[in-house]
C-alpha cells in the first residue's frame, strides 16, 4: 500500500525539516525520496535547503527510466543513486541521503560503524560500511550502492556521507537518524577510551525477541565478552586513572 501523492509529499517536507533542524545537512545538501507507486517516487529537487521544501518544489519521477512525470524543478544530481536502490529491491519505500557530521567523519576516515553499543544501534541501523569514494552525482556513485542494498540498512558514501533506505515511508529516516546517533556515541566512547559492548549472546536474544531482520553482513561486530555484567566504576575513579 503506497502513500497518496499528498502523503508522500508531506513526508518529504517533514523529513526535510527534521534533517535541517537536526543539522544533518548544510546549504542545499541531502536528498529524500518516497515511493508512491510500483514505478514512481516523489523526490527533492537540486539546489534547495531541506528546511525550505514546499509541495511545488518536489518532483515525481519514474523509477524505471528516471523520467520526470510531474513538477518543474530540476531533479537532484544524486537521483540515479536513489533510483538504483528502488531498482535493486522492490520492497524499498523510501531513501534519505544527508551529510551529517559524525557519519561523515567516519566516511572521511574510512571507518565502518560496527560497534555493538546500544540495542538501537545494533537493531535499527546495524553495521554501516564505507563505500569507496566516487564523484558525487556520477554514474559510478549511483552504481556503487547497488551491491549494498540487500545486506545493509545504511551505507556511508566514501568522503561524502550516509544514504539510508527503508521498507516503510519513515524507516529510512529512522535508520539514518539512529546511525548518526550511533556514530556520535562511538566517537564519544573513543574519546573516553572505554567501552563495554553488547555481546554475541545478548544480540542474538535481542534480534530474536524483536524479530529483527539483520543479515550477517549487516550485523554489528559479534563479541564474546561479559564486561557489561561486571560492576560499573565511578566516573571520579576512572577520571583519576586516566589523568595519572
Ligand atoms: Zn551528498
Image (cartoon, rainbow, N blue to C red):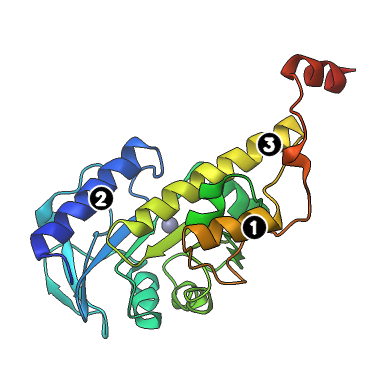
Of 100 and 2, nearer the camera is 2
Image location (x, y in percent) of residue 53:
19, 48
Note whether 151 is above or below 122 in the view shown.
Answer: below
Of pointers 2 and 1, the one earlier in the residue sequence: 2
Residue behind mark 3: 189
Q: Quadrant of residue 113?
A: bottom right
Q: Residue at x 72, y 40 (%)?
A: 228
Crowd class of label 2 (few under 14; some 14 to 19; many from 20; radius 10 Å): some
Q: Quadrant of residue 139?
A: bottom left
Note whether 242 is above or below 34 in the view shown.
Answer: above
The reply, left or right, for residue 217 in relation to residue 232 is left
Crowd class of label 1 (few under 14; some 14 to 19; many from 20; radius 10 Å): some
SS for dot 3: helix
Q: Quadrant of the N terminus?
A: bottom left
Residue behind mark 2: 48
The reply, left or right, for residue 186 in relation to residue 166 is right
Residue behind mark 1: 112
Of pointers 3 and 2, the one earlier in the residue sequence: 2
Image location (x, y in percent) of residue 56:
9, 56
Image location (x, y in percent) of residue 203:
62, 56
Amino acid at each position: 500500500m503506497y502513500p497518496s501523492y499528498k502523503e508522500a509529499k508531506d513526508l518529504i517536507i517533514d523529513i526535510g525539516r527534521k534533517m535541517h533542524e537536526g543539522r544533518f545537512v548544510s546549504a542545499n545538501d541531502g536528498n529524500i525520496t518516497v515511493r508512491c507507486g510500483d514505478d514512481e517516487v516523489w523526490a527533492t529537487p537540486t539546489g534547495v535547503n531541506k528546511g525550505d521544501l514546499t509541495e511545488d518544489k518536489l518532483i515525481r519521477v519514474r523509477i524505471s527510466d528516471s523520467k520526470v512525470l510531474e513538477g518543474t524543478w530540476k531533479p537532484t544530481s544524486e537521483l540515479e543513486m536513489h533510483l538504483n536502490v528502488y531498482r535493486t529491491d522492490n520492497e524499498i519505500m523510501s531513501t534519505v541521503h544527508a551529510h551529517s557530521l559524525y557519519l561523515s567523519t567516519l566516511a572521511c576516515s574510512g571507518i565502518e560503524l560496527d560497534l555493538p553499543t546500544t540495542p538501537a544501534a545494533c537493531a535499527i541501523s546495524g553495521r554501516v560500511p564505507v563505500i569507496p569514494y566516487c564523484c558525487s552525482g556520477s554514474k559510478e556513485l549511483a552504481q556503487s550502492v547497488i551491491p549494498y542494498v540487500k545486506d545493509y540498512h545504511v551505507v556511508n558514501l566514501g568522503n561524502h556521507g550516509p544514504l539510508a533506505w527503508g521498507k516503510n515511508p519513515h524507516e529510512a529516516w529512522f535508520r539514518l537518524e539512529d546511525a548518526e546517533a550511533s556514530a556520535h556515541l562511538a566517537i564519544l566512547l573513543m574519546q573516553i577510551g572505554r567501552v563495554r559492548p553488547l555481546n554475541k549472546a545478548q544480540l542474538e536474544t535481542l534480534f530474536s525477541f524483536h524479530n529483527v531482520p539483520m543479515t550477517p553482513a549487516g550485523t554489528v561486530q559479534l563479541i564474546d565478552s561479559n564486561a557489561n555484567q561486571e560492576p560499573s566504576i565511578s566516573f571520579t575513579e576512572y577520571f583519576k586513572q586516566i589523568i595519572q
